[in-house]
Amino acid sequence: MKKQVSLLIAAMSAAALLAGCGSGQTAETAAATTAAPAETTAAAESETIETFTEAAETADEKETADAADPSAPGSAQVVDQNVTVRVGSLKGPTSMGLVHLMDLAAKEESRCNYEFTMVTAADELLGKMVSGDLDIALIPANVASVLYNKTEGGISVIDINTLGVLDIVASDDSIQSIADLKGKTLYLTGKGTTPDYVIRYLLSANGLTEDDVTLEFKSEATEVAAVLKEQPDAIGLLPQPFVTAACAQNEDLKIVLDLTKEWQAVQGEGGSQLVTGVTVVRDGFLEQNQPLVDAFLEEHQASTEFTLSDPAAASELIAAQGIIEKAPVAQKALPYCNIVCITGDEMKAALSGYLQVLADQDPQAVGGKLPGDDFYYMAQ
């Protein structure tokens, strides 16, 4: 029971670790996107500890009973293809690779029986994972590490679904490298969160100190977009799809630095990658339903390939799911969202290296310590 209470506390704070951009919007931004990417928004849920504790107890009791009953759906002894696989995701880039599978499931054409839940705050998913109301969730990479530590290894990451979605935008063509930021002011959101960690790491790796670049933090991505619109010489750090929306509002703005590429330039070949989102599974569900988890991985991979190979059709599905309001904006943003489905050894190498960088700056960013090898699921 102490484990469940501590997990709740983590759930209330973990999403804030990745709070790169707020969810508020101006009317202009709302015309392009329906909500800020949940991967970089601070959570605002306030359910009581007692509520989640009771839900967690109920989930534990049910899972124990199912394991003891060979006829129970989802039990380890019987693999029932009619078991509902409950998948939660965030309204943002990490769900874009999932939309084709969502569409197939709605048409009852998927291999597994899925129930999808899409929300705008990471802690909503974490609460549902605690209570056992979700089996699989697509969440921020560092939040997965926090959740792993708080549950003492109760979840496993099964794939990376999104690499970096952060870009530096400006109208200044002279900015062609991180070093060119010296002496300038950079507007961004999320002090003490992933965007902050990433830019400080890249500044240091390029020989710059905190005295060389002024980091001006705003509470929401829309505030950064407003500064970029009002000040022609302003430089901003934004996530997709806010980058696409901001550039659409100001034709002089452009992406001057892709932080995913800048990260790769520092890390070199074979190094870690800048990771935004991962997919995790409750170990209780995995132990009882490994074939279903493996089937989900295959269908997630196929759905991702659809999104990448047919962006026009995928953009229509993205708009239909309400991730981005307009399909043309979604199609323009897709090439910059780094949608992937990386598994196995490649997943472990990319994610472990990324978490190491965060841990070196602030161990609490990953839950106090790096996850063990059992954090990484290797499909057979």
Image (spheres, rainbow, N blue to C red):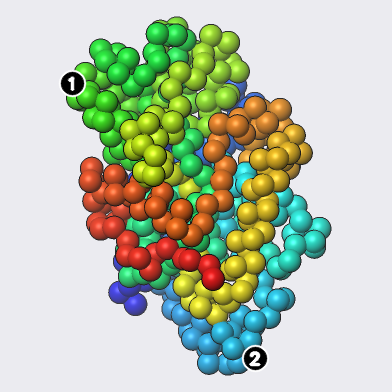
Which amino acid does the dot numbered 1 rest on? Asp
Give residue 71's mark: 2
* Residue 11 spot, x, y in % from top left: 39, 58
Q: Which residue is depicted at the point 59% across and 88% down?
A: 77
**Which structural element holds mark 2?**
loop
Mark 2, Cα crowd under 10 Å, few <14 / some 14-19 / many 20+, is: some
Q: Judge whether 273 appears above or below 159 on screen.
A: above
Query: Can residue 131 be seen in the rendering of this structure?
Result: no
**Which structural element holds mark 1?**
loop
- Alpha carbon of mark 2 to alpha carbon of mark 1: how far? 64 Å
Depth order, front residue of 139/298: 298
Query: Which quarter of the rendering shows the N terminus?
Result: bottom left
Extreme residue toward the front, this view? 269
Q: Which residue is depicted at the point 29% across and 44% down?
A: 357
Read off the residue under disc 1. 211
* Residue 359 spot, x, y in % from top left: 26, 49
Which amino acid does the dot numbered 2 rest on? Ser
Give residue 359's mark: none
Query: Can residue 240 be seen in the rendering of this structure?
Result: yes
